[in-house]
Image (cartoon, rainbow, N blue to C red):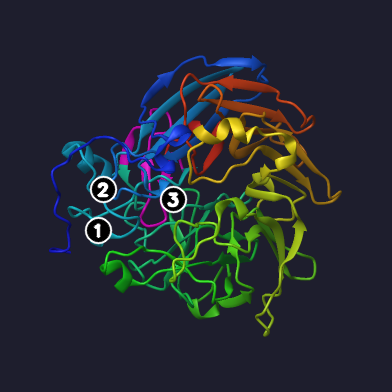
Amino acid sequence: MAGHFRSLPPQASQKFPPFPQFSGFMKPCRFEGEVQNLEVIGSIPLELDGTFYRVMPDPQLPPLIEDDPWFNGDGNVSAFRVQSGKVHFKQRYVRTEKFLKEKEAQRALMGKYRNKYTDAVEIKIRSTANTNIFYFNGMLLACKEDSPPYAMNPETLETIGLWDFNGQLPSLTFSAHPKIDPVTKELVCFGYEAKGDATPDICYYTVSPGGRFKEVVWMVSPVVAMIHDFAVTENYVIFPLIPQTCDIERMKQGGEHWQWNSEIPFYIGVLPRRGAQGSDIKWFRAPNAFPGHVSNAYEADDGQIMLELPISDKNVFFWWPDAQGNAPDPHQITSHLAQFAIDPKASNLDITPQIILKEDIEFCRIDDRFSMSKHRHIFCDLMDPRLGTDFLAIGPVMGGGHPPYNALGHFDEVTGKCEKYFVGPKHLVQEPVFIPRSLDAQEGDGYLLALVNNYELMTSELHLVDTRDFSKPQAIVLLPIRLRAGLHGNWVEGQELELVPN
């Protein structure tokens, strides 16, 4: 790697660049600390006992690349401990190699998103640990899909360090969306670009509840493309490839890691979950589309795999255009819930989606107790301009880069009904998590919890909504600070937090 690093000019300013992704509500927060007994409007059910963890890209210093995408900020993890009707808040940065080197230098050192050839110094593990925060085997795993995760203490949020599962991790990378099988409790995961930047290799693996690796399968992708999320059923794993492709020569010339390609299909890889070899994967082809976050997948009675996720006909990551520099107007991008019926034994690999919900949605969640099996209820973020969001008032302070959603959605696949909880005319919502009312409650009976941006006060709120009465909040928790747009998070039951890692 020696010789490709940028020379550092004298630093003239510590000010963040005047771009939308660093302005208004998206101005970096850079806060660490804790606040006990947050204000609560309404009431939090006493039976709720757990912690909502979420992570946001939050640069601690102005970036080396002035027009840096908001995806490239340092991972800052929030923990909302809910117990006895009260909420306590704690936040800490993940101490990645990047974070520590830049903290010592008091300036940014890492260059473009996932392009080591633009760095000012060598950073061996370039992770920002900013995409998902996941609990497994007694530890929090701060995930970024270009590297192994970082382990954190779930109570203190102290960084334990880079985590390779005690030397077992076979891949250089680890998904930002690992899945827990609700029956076996095993972790199902993968890494893409698994042998390094621009390599077509995918490594799939499963981990026992005690932390021991079981299945390990190496595969080759038809194109080097982003695989942000994936799906799991009882007998299969499914890999949706986003048509953002990578080229190592472009990176070496200082270009972007990702480039949109509208000329290739939307590939969906299907691999037997157990006892497979890499050659067993089938790459199904759908019309070019941008796949969003998987809601779920399951096997129907006839043996077909039913995969559900939002798709868009436009490049959702518009800040990474195609080879000609074409990118869509972000205001024209919408995603609709699609269902793919995939016959894993088929010889014809061409498939077509069916749109089952025409609302503009993303960040789908289900009742995780029904993950990998047939589900009925989907919860999501939703944008409905008819609900009355005052964009004239909030537009100047929203900031940019992140997609705007003004409601939480609850889609019942049996009735076809989509309920909407509108968060307010000067508010937008971030990704929700579903909390069952009890461990034995019926599917979808519980609460939805989501961070909400209050643009009038420029502060953040937590909204708790009862799925039995989706029209109004059960409780609104007020934060004295502003938390910029995050990516992903998860709810962890209090009894799980008592586990000791193996």
Element type where label 3 sits in the image = loop
Does the CB distance between marks 2 and 1 fall below 8 Å?
Answer: yes
Classify residue 344 by image quadrant.
bottom right
| Disc assigned to residue 118 | 1
User: Image height check: is 126 above or below 429?
Assistant: below
User: Image height check: is 328 above or below 346?
Assistant: above
Label 2 vs label 1: CA separation? 9 Å
Residue pictured at 61% horizontal, 38% vertical = 433
| Disc assigned to residue 5 | none
- Image coordinates of residue 368 in percent, x first then y, are 64, 45
Dot placed on the residue nearer the N-terminal end, 2 or 1: 2
Taking depth in this image into account, of 135 and 224 the one nearest to the observer is: 224
Q: Is residue 280 visible in this depiction of the protein?
A: yes
Residue pictured at 59% horizontal, 25% vertical = 49
Which residue position is annotated with label 2? 64
Dot placed on the residue nearer the N-terminal end, 2 or 3: 2
Q: Relative to residue 120, is residue 423 drawn left or right?
A: right
Amino acid type, mark 2: Leu
Does the magenta segment cover residue 156?
Answer: yes
- Image coordinates of residue 206 in percent, x first then y, are 49, 59
Dot placed on the residue nearer the N-terminal end, 3 or 1: 1
Residue pictured at 32% horizontal, 70% vertical = 250
